[in-house]
């Protein structure tokens, strides 16, 4: 709690004194795009942490530290942003935020993976590339297995197309919202396919 108070006090003093961004205490951490996140509710998954912190930029790496034996979250994580400036926003805006009754501690950190440390973190850029490749393969298989006549777009697919086309490119939430909608589309299509299979087996 002292750390949160100190950060708020530093920010308040800088505002009162009109300190420029280059002279800010944040400038000491211009060489790292990592933040430390403490006080996380133990129920939160990696996806939950990304959803909370992506409002201030594009996360590219997350290590939600888990107990090696039980696999349960220990309540703290290290997150890296694509743009270092996002760390300033996350530290200033989410330090002291209360999530599910727990107060978050968010601070800059120079996180470096130790040589003997297992590769536990999630490289979100790499994961995104893998998901795109999987999506392309699934679409190819789907189009090959579908009949000659093209099926009409479902409501969720139209919503996804509209979201991709109309949503502001600069909004850091866009990628998350698009991914969420893609998952919704996949779920609806899977249910439809399952329903079609059942009706064919009854015939």
Image: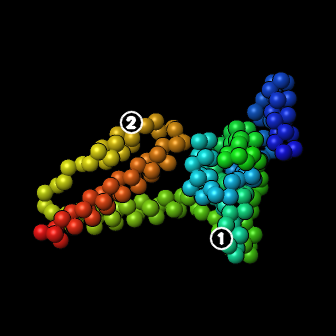
60 and 70: which is toward the camera = 70
Asked if residue 124 can be seen in this view, the reply is yes
| Residue for point 49% across, 58% down | 128
Q: Quadrant of the N terminus?
A: top right
**Circle 2 residue:** 166
| Residue for point 26% across, 48% down | 154
Question: What colour-coding does the image apply?
Answer: rainbow
Label 2 CA crowd tier, 10 Å (few <14, some 14–19, many 20+): few
78 and 94: which is toward the camera = 94
Q: Is residue 64 above or below residue 23?
A: below
**Circle 1 residue:** 71
Asked if residue 32 can be seen in this view, the reply is no
Label 1 CA crowd tier, 10 Å (few <14, some 14–19, many 20+): few
Marks 1, 2: nearer the viewer = 1
Classify mark 2: helix, strand or loop.
Answer: helix
Q: Where is residue 152 shown, x and y percent of the image?
A: 20, 49
Q: Where is residue 15 shown, x and y percent of the image?
A: 80, 26
Q: Where is residue 82 shown, x and y percent of the image?
A: 61, 50
Q: Quadrant of the C terminus?
A: bottom left
| Residue for point 16% across, 69% down | 202
């Amino acid at each position: 709690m002292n750390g949160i108070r100190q950060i708020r006090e530093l920010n308040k003093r800088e505002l009162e004194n009109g300190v420029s961004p280059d002279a800010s205490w944040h400038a000491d951490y211009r060489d790292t795009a990592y933040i430390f996140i403490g006080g996380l509710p133990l129920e939160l998954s990696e996806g939950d942490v990304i959803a909370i912190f992506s409002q201030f930029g594009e996360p590219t790496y997350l290590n939600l530290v888990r107990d090696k034996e039980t696999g349960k979250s220990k309540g703290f994580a290290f997150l890296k942003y694509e743009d270092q400036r996002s760390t300033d926003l996350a530290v200033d805006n989410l330090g002291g935020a209360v999530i599910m009754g727990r107060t978050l501690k968010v601070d800059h950190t120079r996180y470096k993976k130790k040589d003997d440390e297992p590769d536990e973190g999630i490289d979100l850029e790499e994961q995104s590339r893998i998901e795109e490749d999987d999506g392309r393969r699934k679409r190819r298989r789907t189009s090959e297995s579908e009949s000659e006549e093209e099926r009409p777009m479902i409501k969720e697919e139209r919503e996804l197309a509209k979201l991709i086309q109309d949503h502001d490119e600069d909004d850091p939430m866009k990628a998350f919202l698009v991914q969420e909608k893609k998952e919704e589309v996949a779920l609806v299509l899977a249910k439809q396919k399952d329903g079609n299979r059942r009706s064919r087996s009854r015939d």
